[in-house]
Image (cartoon, helix red, strand yellow):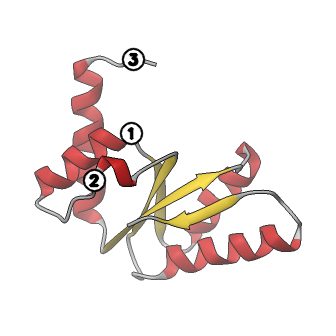
Amino acid sequence: MAITKQQKSTLISSYGDDLAQAKNVVLVKQSGVNVNDSNALRMSIAEAGGKLNVVRKRLFIRSLEKAGLQSVEHKDLEGAIVALYALGDEYAPMKAVQKFIKDAKKADKKLTIEYVG
């Protein structure tokens, strides 16, 4: 779905605000995660003191460059990319993701989540 230049600039500034607040940012590639599971993951990350945000790749890369942070190549970001922002404990959101993956394997769910950057 196409978005306007104004919407793009709003997203870039929103990503920039999130990056400025975060102590740690990790990019995750996901596939096969349904809406209910995604919402459960989002809530567990929020409880852990973090934030989960599905990002538009090119706009997120622009916001990284604007913030002066280490950038990633667009070619390395295939599929649906999620940014995990650690607002409190630097590792708590990643622990929540690891618990989610472990629980999904126990429930025999066909989903994949892998760390990209």
Query: Which disc is residue 13 wearing?
Result: none
Q: Amino acid at mark 1?
A: Arg
Q: Nearest to the eye among marks 2 and 3: give it.
A: 2
**Callout 3: helix, strand or loop?**
loop
**Callout 2: helix, strand or loop?**
loop
Q: Which residue is mark 3?
A: 2
Q: Is residue 57 left or right of residue 38?
A: left
Q: Amino acid at mark 2?
A: Glu
Report crowding for label 1: few under 14, some 14 to 19, many 20 or more residues within 10 A (C-alpha).
some
Residue 54 image point, x, y percent: 48, 46
In this view, the residue in front, 44 or 80, is 80
Residue 92 image point, x, y percent: 51, 80
Say which label, 1 or 3, has the lower sequence index.
Answer: 3
Query: Mark 2–mark 3 contact, CB under 8 Å?
Result: no
> Height in image: 24 above or below 4?
below
**Callout 1: helix, strand or loop?**
loop
Q: Which residue is mark 1?
A: 56
Q: Which residue is mark 2?
A: 73
Residue 14 image point, x, y percent: 29, 44
Mark-to-mark CA distance, 2 and 3: 22 Å
Q: Nearest to the eye among marks 2 and 1: give it.
A: 2
Q: Which residue shows up at 46% across the image and 82% down it?
A: 91
User: How many marks on residues?
Assistant: 3
Quarter of image, res 97: bottom right
> Height in image: 67 above or below 3?
below
Return the residue found at the far right.
Answer: 107
Mark-to-mark CA distance, 2 and 1: 13 Å
